[in-house]
Amino acid sequence: MSKTFDIVLGTTVLVVAIGLVGWLFFYMIRRSEEPGRMLVKCGFTLLLVISCIWLGLKMGPFGPFLIVFMGVVLSIMWTPHIAGFVMNPITSLFDGGNEPPEKKPFYSIAKAKRMRGSYDESIAAVRLQLEKFPNDFEGIMLLASVQAENMKDLQSAEITLNHFCASPKAPPRQVAAAWTTLADWHMQIGVDVDSARALLQKVADHFPGTEIALQAEQRLAHLGGTEKLLMAKHNRVRVVLPEGVKNVGLLDSSEFLKPKEEEPGQVAAQYVKHLTTHPHDSDVREKLALIYGKDFKRLDMATMELAQLINEPRHTPKQITGWLNLLASLQIELGADVATVCGTLEKIVELYPDLPVAEITRRRLARINSEFKGKVETPGVKLGVYEQNIGLKYGSPRKL
């Protein structure tokens, strides 16, 4: 029974040993930079081991010397590979190991040809990379930019970007960036504000209720001013300057020469009219709130405008924090009590407890009493006829 057990145990150990050695050879062949050469070495090793064992049995007492010779030869052949196999896990922590680099497109050739003015060759180089990586956003934008900015071929650039945006796998932010860039090219290169407006509206409609849509709406709100600048740049009108005042140094006063500032009420009315069409224009709404607070001392109306900005969920934490701090400053300036101001600032800590701005707000709360020193209550200024429908709302503001 013990003899049978010894035979089974010996056979098992031999099979396991052969399996481990075979796996080790296979692993080293697979990881080797020259698998063919490694395969030849494995074949030579197997032949050497079999030959030495056979000859060792034939040579009798000289057999052990032959085995030693075989060990020396094998150690010379395999020590570097075995050492690398053992040390590789440690060295990989520093040099990345033998992992192949991530495959990615290279556009250096295309960019160099573009810099030299070889636009057709640059496009060909980009397309060569896009054949291997068809959905690479960097390559798509590089191809479209060469077409639009260098070759002035907006139609081809639009086809390139629309083909990318039509893919269901295209990330939303990349689609929005492509359409927005195309809108910029329509304005800057084609002086086509209508096409730019259509593309920005397409972004807003395609991603409703998102931060992407809000950014598109902001750009739409200021597109009119951009259009005027573009038209003035391309259609220069001769400006005739009136004759200046003579002997200005001899006049008793030059106050009448100062340009007249636009009355705050008129500016507020213009802002309200603008917000009727573009209710999500945060820049204009913030300016309107400042006019209510700074010029008319109307904290209630300034609060209403800032509340609409603060309660818009698509705005970033940085924007909301800025508006809450602005509201707190207006409350201090216009005579609100300490509890009201602290409630406004504590809203920042409540909304963003894990952001650095929460700690900054806590420090401001700790010294809030010092901000009230020297502040006196300022009476509100009565608004004129332009007050009708002023303080436009695009939804009832929630309490802060």
Image (tube, rainbow, N blue to C red):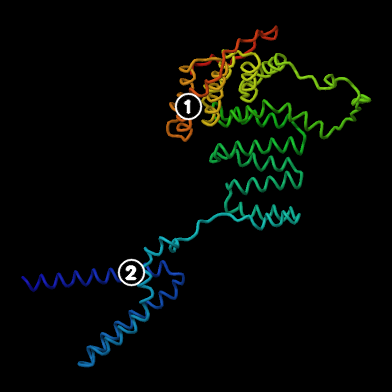
Which numbered disc, 2 or 1, marks the residue closer to the eye? 1
The x, y position of residue 169, in whole percent, is 53, 41
Residue at image location 61% in from the left, 19% down from the top: 289
Would you name the residue on which mark 1 appears?
367
Q: In this picture, is 123 found above or below 286?
A: below
The x, y position of residue 244, in whole percent, is 91, 26
Residue at image location 66% in from the left, 38% down from the top: 181
Count residues near mark 1 (Cα–Cα under 10 Å), then give few for <14, some for 14-19, many for 20+: few
Label 2: state its secondary structure. Answer: helix
Quarter of image, res 236: top right
Going by the numbered disc 2, the residue's amino acid type is Leu
Would you name the residue on which mark 2 appears?
24
The x, y position of residue 253, in whole percent, is 85, 20
Residue at image location 63% in from the left, 24% down from the top: 281
Q: Quadrant of the N terminus?
A: bottom left
Q: In this picture, is 346 found above or below 102?
A: above
Label 1: state its secondary structure. Answer: loop
Q: Give the label on residue 212, or none.
A: none
Residue nearest the viewer, comparing 323 with 184 = 323
- Measure the alpha-carbon separation of dots 2 and 1: 70 Å
Going by the numbered disc 1, the residue's amino acid type is Arg
Q: Are marks 2 and 1 in contact (CB under 8 Å)?
A: no
Count residues near mark 2 (Cα–Cα under 10 Å), then give few for <14, some for 14-19, many for 20+: some
